[in-house]
């Protein structure tokens, strides 16, 4: 007797729904990282007269580097999640089509 396998299409649909929620959240996170974490060049302090506040410049540069790294990470997570969602949707459609073809063949259509 041949082994039988069954794919739970509702589980794939639930996965797609959850992935869409994650993508929405990642879009919000990317927007927040880009637009809500900006600092002006003197937000962390400035030089006074002939006294240069080197740490302020270093902190501002470190902030910019971290901001760019976070934006990059969030974008990568978005891309990977989107790709997984696209592939899951394709697999769901293929299984759905196969199920319909099998049902049609069994009914003699």
Image (cartoon, grey):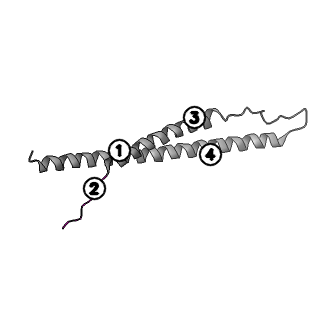
From the image, tell me which residue sits under label 3: 31
Query: Circle 4: is it few (<14), some (14-19), or many (20+) Cα within 10 Å?
Result: few
Of labels 1 and 3, the one closer to you: 1
Marks 2 and 1 sit apart, C-alpha to C-alpha, by: 17 Å
Q: Could you tell whether 104 is left or right of 26 in the image?
A: left
- Residue 91 at x, y = what percent? 32, 49
From the image, tell me which residue sits under label 1: 89
Residue furthest to the right in view is 50
Determine the image quadrant of residue 33.
Answer: top right
Res. 6 mark: 2
Question: How many circles with numbers are drawn on the protein?
Answer: 4
Q: Counting residues from the N terminus, which is met first, the one under dot 2 or under dot 4?
A: 2
- Residue 86 at x, y = what percent? 38, 44
Query: Circle 1: is it few (<14), some (14-19), or many (20+) Cα within 10 Å?
Result: some
Mark 3 residue element: helix
Give the residue drawn at x 36%, y 48%: 11
Most prominent secondary structure in the magenta stretch?
A: loop
Q: Counting residues from the N terminus, which is met first, the one under dot 3 or under dot 2?
A: 2
Of residues 92 and 32, which is closer to you in this image? 92
């Amino acid at each position: 007797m041949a082994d039988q396998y069954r794919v739970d299409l509702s589980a794939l649909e639930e996965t797609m729904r959850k992935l869409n929620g994650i993508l929405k959240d990642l879009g919000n996170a990317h927007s927040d990282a880009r637009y809500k974490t900006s600092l002006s060049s003197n937000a962390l302090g400035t030089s006074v007269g002939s006294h240069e506040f080197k740490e302020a410049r270093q902190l501002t540069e470190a902030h910019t580097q971290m901001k760019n790294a976070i934006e990059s990470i969030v974008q990568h997570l978005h891309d990977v999640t989107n790709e997984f969602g696209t592939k899951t949707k394709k697999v769901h459609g293929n299984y759905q089509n196969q199920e319909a073809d099998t049902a049609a063949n069994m009914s003699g259509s």
